[in-house]
Image (tube, rainbow, N blue to C red):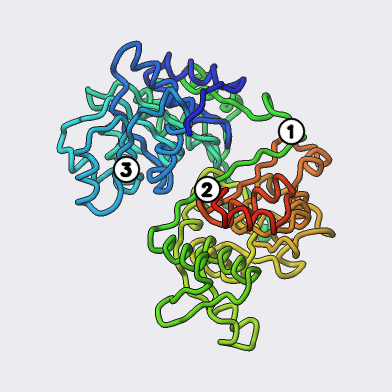
């Protein structure tokens, strides 16, 4: 149900920035409401000039599939906007483009396809580049097909507004700004070409190898004052909103990432919820009690279902005896990785079947098994650490030096275990380490499933039995 939009203290300045600049960037950290600011600004622009819609909203696949349709539905003033999701097969994408809508959401991988499909025509008035650091590799004569195609679309005569949204515009250094700014001003501020940009603010020096004194190598360096000069040049079109300037860092910031189960997966889930039994491929999976049913439902919400526990007597072999049902949570985790922009993640998993599925999607993910895994994570050598809350509770310190983000891929009823793993990177530890940054807690929640009951259990501390009984009576939706 939509609600009245009451801007948070920092949002009016962001909305004004988007309204006042036809081409601009909004650099706002995770959870600061970039999407709601953008929709509100475009709504105001359309009332003033009538040239905001339709808009092409670009982002990772999950963003294209869900974020804009969910966000516009939250608020009274945007609920009437329509979203057409340009995803799927070429035929499905073409059909989506033919549907009248205010917003057409597309994933970056299909930008080159869109340019070819449009054939020089331009139905859009606005382009929104969410996760705009993906534009950093643009070059006038080189670069990838996606950025070259988008650059042509961005500078079509009919485009009136180009908006870049990101949390960290240059996670790997200042050099990532040139490509993004070229979509805003065609090189006016940072140089017409990447070469001129690089020659102005960067250089190289030869340094002696730390291990072999007889060898040297070339090392890039940033020239003095480059940081201040570059940020000074882009400050008029790039507004940065820093969470620490507005939020109480003593409290974690929670974000719920809702995912929709695919229809087939939801049918299986509902069957298990109703009948205590499902058939997956040639395997029959049965729950013999209410407790075992809740476990099966949590597994299905995560995306996999264990086979009958009697299939294997060995625990490790049994852990591999599961069937994947969906990857909705994997896609959500990918969007969090994108948004984290290089910050290592602590990911809480609940079932062993979660681990190989995550590692297949993120080959560099490491499981917390030993002190070496712990030490490697604290040394910054692990991009994603997978940990069961029981294995990352008391006795572990130093994670707060590495990250301020924890993701709950799966959920469990025990609130104490949840609180213990959160505390590994919690606000108190961040402050003790002298780090002025908020702690972000992401809950990936499968809509319409037992995940929602577990989260309600954590928020209200109601008994598990009461929640399950209430759910079976349809009191919770």
Classify 10 Å Cα crowding around label 2: few (below 14), some (14-19), many (20 and above): few
Q: Residue at x 50, y 56 (%)?
A: 329
Q: Residue furthest front?
A: 473
Q: Residue at x 50, y 74 (%)?
A: 277
The local secondary structure at tag 3 comes to strand
**Residue annotated with mark 3:** 85
Classify 10 Å Cα crowding around label 1: few (below 14), some (14-19), many (20 and above): many
Q: Residue furthest top?
A: 48
**Residue annotated with mark 1:** 249
Where does the image place residue 303, in percent across and percent down from the top left?
50, 64
Q: Nearer the viewer, mark 1 or mark 3?
A: 3
Give above or below for 95 relative to 225. below
Which of the 4 image quadrants contains residue 387? bottom right
Q: Nearer the viewer, mark 1 or mark 2?
A: 2
Which of the 4 image quadrants contains residue 464? bottom right
How many numbered tags mark residues here?
Answer: 3
The local secondary structure at tag 1 comes to loop
Q: Are marks 3 and 2 in contact (CB under 8 Å)?
A: no
Where does the image place residue 17, in percent across and percent down from the top left?
48, 17
- 282 or 126, nearer to the observer: 282
Give above or below for 474 relative to 244. below
Q: Which numbered disc flags the more N-terminal residue, 3 or 2?
A: 3
Where does the image place residue 84, in percent across and percent down from the top left?
30, 39
Q: Are marks 1 and 2 in contact (CB under 8 Å)?
A: no
Q: Is residue 427 left or right of residue 268?
A: right
Residue 477: image tag: 2
Cα separation, mark 1 vs mark 3, equals 36 Å
């Amino acid at each position: 149900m939509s609600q009245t939009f009451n801007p948070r203290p920092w949002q009016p300045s962001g909305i004004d920035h988007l309204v006042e600049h036809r081409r601009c960037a909004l650099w706002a950290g995770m959870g600061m409401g970039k999407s709601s600011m953008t929709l509100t600004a475009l709504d105001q622009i359309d009332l003033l000039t009538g040239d905001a819609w339709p808009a092409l909203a670009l982002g990772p696949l999950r963003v294209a599939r869900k974020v804009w349709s969910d966000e516009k539905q939250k608020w009274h003033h945007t609920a009437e906007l329509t979203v057409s999701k340009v995803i799927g097969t070429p035929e499905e994408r073409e059909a989506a483009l033919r549907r009248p809508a205010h917003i057409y959401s597309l994933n970056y991988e299909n930008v080159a396809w869109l340019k070819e499909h449009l054939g020089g025509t331009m139905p859009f008035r606005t382009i929104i580049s969410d996760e705009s650091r993906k534009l950093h590799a643009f070059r006038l004569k080189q670069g990838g097909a996606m950025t070259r195609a988008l650059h042509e679309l961005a500078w079509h005569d009919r485009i009136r507004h180009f908006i870049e949204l990101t949390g960290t515009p240059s996670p790997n250094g200042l050099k990532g700004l040139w490509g993004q700014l070229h979509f805003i001003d065609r090189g006016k501020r940072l140089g017409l070409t990447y070469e001129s940009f690089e020659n102005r603010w960067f250089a190289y020096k030869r340094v002696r190898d730390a291990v072999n004194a007889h060898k040297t190598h070339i090392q890039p360096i940033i020239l003095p004052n480059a940081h201040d000069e570059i940020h000074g040049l882009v400050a008029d079109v790039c507004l940065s909103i820093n969470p620490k300037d507005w939020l109480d860092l003593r409290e974690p910031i929670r974000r719920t990432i809702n995912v929709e189960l695919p229809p087939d997966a939801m049918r299986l889930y509902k069957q298990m919820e109703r009948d205590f039994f499902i058939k997956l491929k040639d395997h029959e999976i049965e729950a013999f009690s209410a407790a075992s049913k809740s476990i099966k439902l949590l597994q299905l919400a995560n995306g996999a279902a264990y086979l009958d526990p009697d299939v294997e007597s060995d625990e490790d072999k049994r852990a591999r005896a599961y069937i994947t049902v969906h990857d909705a949570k994997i896609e959500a985790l990918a969007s969090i990785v994108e948004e984290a922009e290089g910050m290592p993640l602590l990911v809480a998993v609940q079932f062993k079947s979660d681990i190989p599925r995550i590692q297949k999607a993120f080959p560099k993910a490491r499981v917390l098994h030993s002190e070496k895994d712990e030490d490697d994570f604290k040394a910054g050598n692990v991009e994603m650490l997978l940990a069961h809350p029981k294995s990352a509770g008391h006795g572990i310190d130093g994670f707060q030096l590495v990250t301020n983000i924890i993701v709950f891929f799966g959920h469990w009823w025990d609130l104490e275990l949840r609180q213990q793993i959160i505390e590994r990177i919690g606000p108190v530890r961040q402050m003790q380490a002298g780090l002025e940054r908020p702690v972000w807690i992401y809950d990936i929640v499968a809509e319409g499933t037992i995940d929602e009951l577990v989260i309600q259990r954590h928020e209200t501390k109601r008994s598990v039995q009461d929640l399950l009984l209430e759910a079976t009576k349809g009191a919770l939706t």
